[in-house]
Amino acid sequence: MLLYLHGFTSAPQSHKARALQARMVARGCGDRFVCPQLPPSPREAIALAERLVAGAAAPVTLVGSSLGGYYATWLAERHDLRAVLVNPAVVAHLSLQQFVGPQTNLYTGERFDFTLGHVEELRAIEVPRIAEPGRFWLLVEEGDEVLDYRQAVQRYRGARQTVLPGGDHSFTRWPDYMDGIIGFAGLA
């Protein structure tokens, strides 16, 4: 199973999630793609992902984008899973603190309050050091205007890394890497 974890104020309707699902369907493994709508609470988002991991009938590979990459890191370390991290948040409790207050989901229009309690929930799941870098594949674009790609390169030292010039936080070269992600998940 490939469990895709979207970013902050994102949703399963995001471009990357829909494109990866379509590619998996085209390759005959669409039934192994799961992308839940993550709740605004990091604690609740992790609990939902853990239920999906626990209930999976096949090995799970995580794909996390931005905040989803932060979640995927914690889940991969806790459950000995492989993970692909796309422009991941590295210190989410610091980078998202500036967004405390009312927020709107970019895809669903749902409004929610992002609180200091949520920031503390993020702090509680920080992974200061990766135990097994070989389980990770980092995909970053140097032009990410939201997160400093160099933090991710440092944090995931020893992992497979694809560092590309230009681009932006959306990871503009996504179509070029979907087949590789499917293969990394053992679904090729």
Image (cartoon, rainbow, N blue to C red):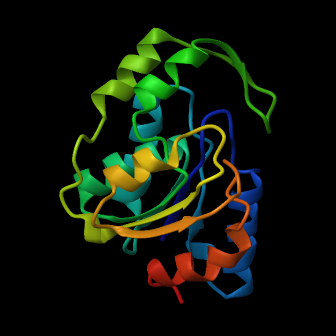
Residue at 29% in and 27% down: 124
Above or below residue 148? Residue 42 is: above
Q: Residue at x 40, y 71 (%)?
A: 57
Q: Quadrant of residue 31?
A: bottom right
Q: Compare residues 84 and 45 and report the one nearer the observer.
A: 84
**Is 33 located above or below residue 114 in the figure?**
below
Q: Residue 66: percent from the left, percent from the top?
A: 55, 45
> In front here: 159 or 42?
159
Furthest residue toward left: 131
15 sits left or right of 186 in the view: right
The answer to whether 147 is drawn above or below residue 122 in the figure is: below
Q: Residue at x 44, y 54 (%)?
A: 52
- Residue 38 image-quadrant placement: top right
- What residue do we see at 79% from left, 35% from top? 108
Residue 51 shows up from this direction: no
Left or right of residue 136, residue 88 in this image: right
Q: Is residue 127 placed above or below 122 in the rendered structure? A: below
Nearer the observer, 28 or 119: 119
Residue 156, given in percent of the width and then of the height, sits at 33, 57
Quadrant for the C terminus in the image: bottom right
Q: Tell me where residue 54 appears, x and y as whole percent.
A: 34, 56
Q: Where is residue 144 drawn, in percent x and y? A: 63, 47
Residue 4 shows in this picture: yes
**Looking at the image, how many numbered discs can be counted on the residues?**
0
